[in-house]
Amino acid sequence: MNPLITLILCITLLHSEAESDISFTYGFIGRLQSNPDSLIELSDSSVIYTRDNIQINVGYANNTIFYSIYVDSEGTFMLTYPEDFSDISNNQNQPDTLYKTVLRGGLIDPPGYETFYLINSSTPLTELTNLIGRYDTAPEKGKLKLANRIQAQIDTLDPNIKGELAFIPNRLDKPMVGGVAFRGDDEDHLKDGSLTHVCTGSGGIAFQKIVLNHR
């Protein structure tokens, strides 16, 4: 390979690593009606069915802010975490890493694509949360316009849409619960509080989009 090209590639890699300044861990867990006694790990494009139960667990630094946004099969936006905007930065006297369940529940009809946005930010996303707050109380005719604006705001954070380097989430070597890796016979078993992946971002934003195929 041309030495100049090699040097450019090395500089690009080092630059992207240097910009990797924020990350969070997460676990997307499913309990399916077809096998309710077991838990499975869900990922982008997983197929699920009505009344299947899902749970999203996250771990993030207490000096950052985490947002979980759910868009159901009919395109309705819901901010599932944080539930209280007034408490959004009240992480003083907390552990260095916070572990939360940001969504839990069963899927209802109609089927379609269920979209989940997990966003970790070093600063409050005030415009986004203000739009969602207005959306929650808007009449039906106003929701569509606000939904378009909310989606546009989300898209400004998505590195795949912005054309920036998107860090591919990595699977943890061992599942974790509250920051503690499983040991012994349980090391490959999922539990309700499991964290299975780490998502790394840059520029103060770590962003993960997961779409489930609800049939």
Image (cartoon, rainbow, N blue to C red):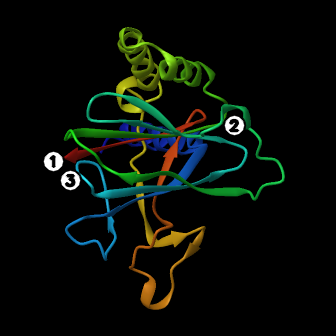
- Whether pointer 1 and pointer 3 mark residues with C-beta atoms closer than 8 Å, the reply is yes
User: Mark 1, residues whose alpha carbon is within 10 Å: few (<14), some, or many (≥20)?
Assistant: few
Callout 2: SS? loop
Q: How crowded is mark 2: few (under 14 residues within 10 Å), some or many (20 or more)?
A: some
Name the residue carrying label 2.
88
Q: Name the residue under label 3.
A: 49
Residue, disc 1: 215
Q: In the figure, 52 relative to 151: above or below? A: below
- Indicate the amino acid at tag 1: Arg
Q: Earlier in the sequence, mark 1 or mark 2?
A: 2
Kindly state the secondary structure of the residue where label 1 is placed. loop
Residue visible at 84% across and 53% down in the picture: 93
Under mark 2, the amino acid is Ile
Q: Which of 6 and 182 is in front in this view?
A: 182
Q: Distance between the residues labelled 3 and 2?
A: 33 Å
Counting residues from the N terminus, which is met first, the one under dot 1 or under dot 3? 3
Check disc 3 and give the amino acid type.
Tyr
In this view, 71 is above or below 173: above
Q: Rounded to the nearest whole Å, what is the CA distance between mark 1 and mark 3?
A: 5 Å
Q: Left or right: 63 with respect to 142?
A: right
The answer to which of marks 3 and 2 sits earlier in the sequence is 3
Q: Where is residue 172 in the image (x, y as percent from the top left)?
A: 45, 66
Name the residue at 55% across, 51% down: 24
Q: Which residue is drawn at 82% across and 47% down?
A: 92
